[in-house]
Amino acid sequence: MSSTMQVWSRAIVFVDMNAFFASIEQRDFPELRGKPVGVTNGEQGSCIITSSYEARAQGVHTGMRLYEARQLCPGLIQRPARPERYAQVSTQLMAALQQYISPDMEVFSVDEAFLDVTMCQRLLGTPAQIGRRTQQLVERVTGLHCSIGVSGDKTTAKYAGKLQKPNGFTVIPPWQAQQRLRDVPVTELCGIAEGIGKFLAARGVHTCGDMAHLPIGVLAKRFGNPGRRIWYMCQGADPEPLQQMIAPPKSIGHGKVMPPGTLRQDTLQTYLLHMSEKVGARLRRHQLQAREFYIGLHTAEDWLEGRWSSELPTNDGKVINTLCQTMLQQCWRGEGIYQVQIIALDPQPVDGQLELFTQADTRRVACNAAMDRINNRYGEFTLAPARLLNRSKMPNVIAPAWKPNGHRQTI
């Protein structure tokens, strides 16, 4: 890099894959290229998870019902989601970014990442040049397009990355960030949701520029350190570092949407067993166990829900399902059910003291270990309780906080 080039004191590149799931479908199946594609959660899925830009041009958007999408776009091609494939491509992409651009990376979601390239400038060029290099690498590794945002902090870089799609590229130098954000509504910044937006609006803060007139102490008193960060975010000076360490999970859970208004008890028991086994397997995968579990059934009106505790900490799906049966007896009165949810609320590391178990428990531990080895090799639920032969055919989904390694690698 030329000695006359200005070195940024901090440089962040934000990578945002464009219509990631739909683009992978079009890449893997060339007959879909250039056509409107809507990805749903399985063949039976009735809601659009994401859509190609050809479909978006006709008004199709994420969250839209499939029948509504087809009214707007009669030629829409439905594709069942393949979450394992999307996670595979994401893992490949994140590894390449970390190896060839910067080791300082935060995987923000399955299709987004922040790269701190501050220390790479003398090696790879200006932040803008590094951003272009990143975009070219993404296309070379995945064959897909992405939008790039480059700035001096995470929030401004993410905002920049959303400005031009698809295949966009936006640079906002740190010394221009405050001015560029001045007229931007505060709720357009990542992390400022509707509730915080209403709090700010009540105090006259509608745009980022308005924030300069609100003392930082007002936000700090109401929201603590996150409030202080919001104040700086609106000034184009987000101090938040990249989050590279994956924190231990505060909870581990799985849920499933059921056929609307399910009344059959045997169907409900199958879904609860399915989720119990998934929660148990995931706890075992990360050598965790829990004693307290949230169990919920979503009706047309509300949730039937509560917390149930096992006698000892467990990661056994059979034990978790026993709690579910207790919940059914105590809470369900035959209402139509739309969704089930099970969450291990207090996961803790397994201490390995098997002498505390009875002989029967020791056999269950060995049985689960054998089942996990088979399923890890041949696929989820290759070996499972017989009732799960009738489980839902809806595929898994990628968790919002997905990471390519660590506790959050869940599908």
Image (cartoon, rainbow, N blue to C red):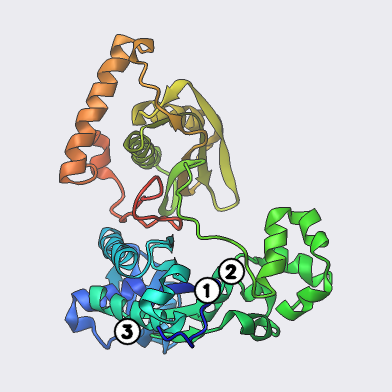
Up-down relation of residue 182 to residue 256 (above or below): below
Looking at the image, which residue is at 55% across and 60% down? Answer: 241
Q: Is residue 204 left or right of residue 358?
A: right
Q: Is residue 202 left or right of residue 239?
A: right
As shown in the figure, which amino acid type bears the numbered disc 2? Cys
Distance CA(mark 2)–CA(mark 3): 29 Å
Up-down relation of residue 396 to residue 60 (above or below): above
Asked if the residue at tag 1 contacts the one at tag 2, i.e. Cβ–Cβ closer than 8 Å, the answer is: yes
| Residue neighbourhood size for the residue with mark 1, other residues' Cα within 10 Å, grouped as few (<14), some (14–19), many (≥20) | many
| Residue neighbourhood size for the residue with mark 3, other residues' Cα within 10 Å, grouped as few (<14), some (14–19), many (≥20) | many
Residue 42: x and y in percent read 30, 62
Looking at the image, which residue is at 69% across and 74% down? Answer: 235
Q: Which residue is mark 2?
A: 190
Frontmost residue, 97 versus 300: 97
As shown in the figure, which amino acid type bears the numbered disc 1? Lys
Q: Which residue is mark 1?
A: 158
Up-down relation of residue 346 to residue 221 (above or below): above
Frontmost residue, 291 versus 155: 155
Can the viewer see residue 51 in this picture? no
Sequence-first tag of 2 and 3:
3
Q: Which residue is mark 3?
A: 36
Distance CA(mark 2)–CA(mark 1): 8 Å
Residue 117: x and y in percent read 44, 70
Looking at the image, which residue is at 39% across and 68% down? Answer: 111
Assign the N terminus to one quadrant of the image: bottom left
Residue 83: x and y in percent read 30, 60
As shown in the figure, which amino acid type bears the numbered disc 3? Pro
| Residue neighbourhood size for the residue with mark 2, other residues' Cα within 10 Å, grouped as few (<14), some (14–19), many (≥20) | some
Give the SS element for disc 3.
loop
Sequence-first tag of 1 and 3:
3
